[in-house]
Image (tube, rainbow, N blue to C red):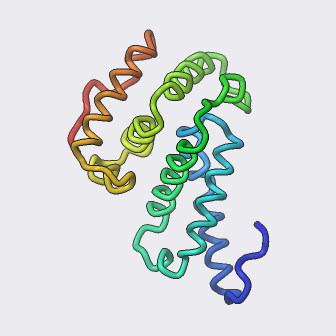
């Protein structure tokens, strides 16, 4: 990480570095689920860290700074989709070796997720990848709980259509938790 903001105390900077070190892996994986590209996921996380650092004085006092960081990553993803409409290519989806039996399933699921509209994809990722409640997802994305429920149902239905044999991996219905 490049040098932090000029004029901040070493303790303040070290506290932020510790936060980044502890949260980076999970945020990067979450960003990857959203965008399907490891490089773009890293960019999303770095952009999120820039935004978080600007507000670190307040964020560090929050009970759950990791949840706040996750919310910022999702917002960065949605902001980026407003400006960038192309989807990640299938070739860029996996950049590490996987077990042979899992490769087809992963590629199929990631390709199906990539076909969802950005907001629907964000809802599905928060609800089923991050295991967030309807209310938590609504708060993170700035939408009503009813919108989250309908987008979850619509997103799961679209995934079922696209997944074929792998559709059994999806939840049976949209719970209201």
Against 77, residue 37 (above or below) is above
Q: What is the residue that sits farthest to the top in this orientation?
A: 165
Q: In this rendering, would 53 be left or right of 61?
A: right
Quadrant of the image containing the C terminus: top left
Against 107, residue 15 (above or below) is below
Q: In this rendering, would 6 be left or right of 132?
A: right
Task: Give the percent coordinates (x, y) of residue 160.
Answer: 38, 18
Residue at image point 61% right, 64% down: 49
Q: Front-most of 4 and 104? A: 4
Q: What is the residue that sits farthest to the right in this orientation?
A: 2
Quadrant of the image containing the N terminus: bottom right
Q: Front-most of 102 and 47? A: 47
Q: In this rendering, would 164 be left or right of 107?
A: left
Q: Front-most of 77 and 174? A: 77
Q: Front-most of 166 and 90? A: 90
Task: Give the percent coordinates (x, y) of residue 128.
Answer: 39, 38
Residue at image point 51% right, 61% down: 69
Q: In this rendering, would 166 be left or right of 29?
A: left
In which quarter of the view is residue 97 placed? Answer: top right
Task: Give the percent coordinates (x, y) of residue 140.
Answer: 38, 55
Residue at image point 28% right, 29% down: 153
- Image mark count: 0
Residue at image point 53% right, 44% down: 82
Task: Give the percent coordinates (x, y) of residue 105.
Answer: 55, 19
């Amino acid at each position: 990480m490049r040098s932090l903001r000029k004029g901040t105390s070493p303790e303040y900077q070290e506290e932020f570095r510790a936060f980044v070190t502890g949260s980076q892996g999970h945020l990067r994986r979450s960003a990857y689920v959203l965008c399907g590209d490891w490089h773009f996921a890293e960019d999303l996380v770095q952009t999120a860290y820039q935004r978080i650092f600007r507000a670190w004085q307040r964020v560090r006092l929050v009970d759950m700074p990791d949840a706040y960081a996750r919310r910022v990553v999702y917002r960065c993803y949605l902001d980026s989709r407003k400006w960038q409409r192309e989807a990640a290519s299938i070739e860029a989806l996996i950049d590490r070796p996987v077990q042979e039996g899992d490769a087809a399933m992963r590629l199929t699921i990631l390709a199906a997720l990539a076909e969802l509209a950005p907001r629907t994809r964000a809802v599905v990722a928060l609800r089923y990848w991050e295991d967030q409640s309807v209310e938590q997802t609504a708060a993170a994305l700035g939408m009503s709980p009813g919108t989250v429920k309908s987008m979850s149902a619509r997103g799961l239905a679209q995934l079922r259509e696209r997944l074929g044999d792998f559709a059994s991996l999806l939840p049976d219905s949209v719970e209201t938790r």
